[in-house]
Amino acid sequence: MTNLPERDERRPGARELARRAMRAQVSEMALDLFLDRGYEQTTIDDICAVAGISRSTFFRYFPSKEDVFANETSTAVDEIAQALRERPDHEAPWSALRHAMSPLVEYYATKTERAHRLAALAVKTPALATINQEKNARFRALIAPELARRLGTDPDDPTDPRPRALIGSALGCLEAAVAAWIAGDGTQQLGRLLDRAMASISPGSPEQ
């Protein structure tokens, strides 16, 4: 009897890959509409018409219009958490956090004009504020355990303010850097702006 190779459970199957591809395609078309018409002026029916899908198909991929927008950077938080876990143990938590945010900075760097327009749209659209709040909450939940480990504290200990303080400060620096990047029409490097913001919190951190 021939032994079949064991299936790698971590690898997505063909159906899941097709689903991700369709989700990405619909998201890309929707984002184009948001940039062209405005987020609030674009309806789900508009997205369905451009993507050539029905409303029921749309809702199989996205629970709401807000989720379409969130899909653009949906993996950023996971990548930051993974990058933080891969940083050297001897590295200071603040420095490790800065390096871990590189995937998000690189994303903006590779899609400068489009990313700038989308970031500006998110900032000026009140309906998208919830997405940012949810992303920050997820960031805190994923990052806190690793920061606690690096600090030598119990991640479930609510009496230690340090992990939450570091995360809150890092998010504040990132938001300040993005705001400055938007104000400068995307002409400055987001990475350098983030370095400056984080160095202002920890003066000993060199600006790269």
Image: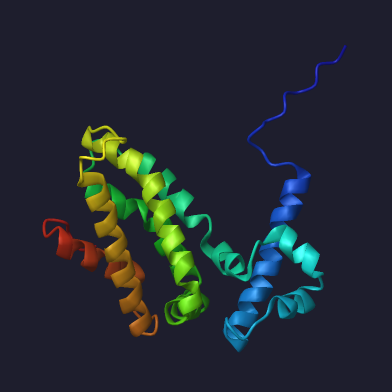
Q: Nearer the viewer, residue 18 or 103?
A: 18
Which residue reaches farthest front? 158
Question: Can residue 87 be seen?
Answer: no
**x and y percentages locating residue 13 in the rendered image:** 74, 41
Residue at 51%, 62% (x, y): give it.
Answer: 73
**Horizontal relation, residue 14 to residue 35: left or right:** right
Q: Is residue 190 left or right of residue 76?
A: left
Residue drawn at (58%, 83%) of the image: 40
The residue sitting at 72% across, 63% down in the picture is 59
Q: Is residue 197 above or below residue 44?
A: above
Query: Horizontally, is 65 left or right of 107 in the view?
Result: right
> Compared with residue 172, is residue 157 higher up or lower down, i.e. above or below?
above
Q: Residue at x 44, y 52 (%)?
A: 138
Give the quarter of the image for residue 9. top right
Residue 69: percent from left, percent from top: 57, 69
User: For the C terminus, which image quadrant?
Assistant: bottom left
- Residue 173, position as x, y percentages in the image: 27, 65
Pick whichever, 148 or 158, lies toward us.
Answer: 158
